[in-house]
Amino acid sequence: MTHSFVETKDGVQIFYKDWGPKEAQPIVFHHGWPLSSDDWDAQMLFFVQKGFRVVAHDRRGHGRSSQVSEGHDMDHYAADAFAVVEHLNLRNAVHIGHSTGGGEVARYVAKFGEPAGRVAKAVLVAAVPPLMLKTASNPGGLPLEVFDGFRSALAANRAQFFHDVPAGPFYGFNRDGAKVYPAVVENWWRQGMMGSAKAHYDGIKAFSETDQTEDLKAITVPTLVMHGDDDQIVPIADSAELSVKLLKNGTLKVYKGYPHGMLTTHADVINPDLLAFIKG
């Protein structure tokens, strides 16, 4: 029997999925805030059918993983991912991260994956690095008030907030002429509400205030940076366009008019592009 949980060094149960042939090249997926590994359904089904081994885990405090009080920061996120990778003994892996998961991938590859010789390539999709928060050294970032607003909305009425985000900016459903998928909104809500309010609250600081400049500089494996130029959650100018300059071996692919949640809304375009990069 394959157990669906791995226990971290600090005693947290991390839920994971592991599909496909064990001898195949592994692709590891790192989800965004406040979601779960279920957000990768469109990618995992695509790649398992292409013969890959696909692995995805629920971040601590998210989805089916332990709702622990502490450790909701990029260092723990990366260490938890490494616990899954070591448990499954994954080598030559491709790590793909969306949004906050992109930050997790950058920290993971820099601090764990490359030093352990376990990473082949990385992909950052609509990812938060190098730094979302506006600071003296990051003038193009978003002001702290934006993230304080997230915290206030979450604390006041998480269920409503977790409806408004996907119904509006996350998938670009607030744009004129957008094709809206109500079930996609419901699925985002379902994933979010499975997780812990404290993990989600603390996670806002993790994804907005973690400076990952040095992580990006340390990565040497081929890294694909994918971003929609109509991303209303992680604006492209202060994320992807800066990240690709910091990466030693980075490539930027920009998707005109695509939203933050393009992995779901435009999987038919994104998946073949991911496959081409992985095989290339």
Image (cartoon, rainbow, N blue to C red):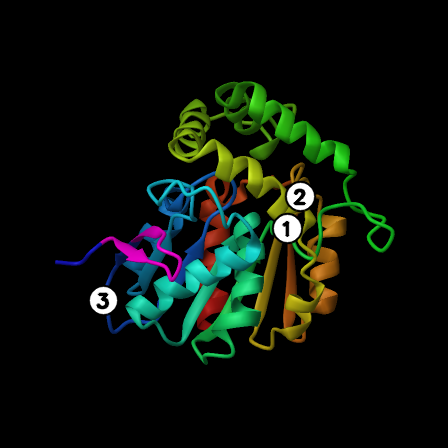
Q: Are marks 3 and 2 in contact (CB under 8 Å)?
A: no
Q: Position of residue 250 (x, y in %)?
A: 64, 69
Q: Position of residue 266 (x, y in %)?
A: 50, 43
Q: Secondary structure at mark 1?
A: loop
Nearer to me, 111 or 49: 111
User: In terms of sequence position, does the residue under pointer 3 or pointer 2 come before the other?
Assistant: 3
Magenta-drawn segment: 4-16
Q: Which residue is mark 1?
A: 128
The label shown at residue 234 is: 2
The mark that comes first in sequence, 1 or 3, is 3
**Secondary structure of residue under mark 3:** loop
Please tell me which residue lies in front, 237 or 230.
237
> Which residue type carries mark 1?
Val
Relative to residue 109, is residue 210 drawn left or right? right
Q: Secondary structure at mark 2?
A: loop
Q: Position of residue 272 (x, y in %)?
A: 45, 57
Q: Most extreme residue toward the left, as rendered?
A: 1
Which residue is rendered at x = 35% and y = 55% of the image? Answer: 11
**In the rendered view, does 192 fall on the left or right side of 75?**
left
Residue 122, percent across and down?
Answer: 52, 66
Residue drawn at x 71%, y 44% is 235
Amino acid carrying mark 3 in the image = Pro
Tell me whether circle 1 and circle 2 mark residues in contact (CB < 8 Å): yes
Judging by the rendered image, the residue that carries numbered circle 3 is 21
Label 1 – label 2 distance at C-alpha: 6 Å
Tell me the amino acid under the disc marked 2.
Val
Q: Residues within 10 Å of mark 2 (few under 14, many from 20)?
A: many
Residue 226 at least partly seen: yes
Say whether residue 70 is magenta.
no
Report the residue at 51% width, 76% height from top. Answer: 114
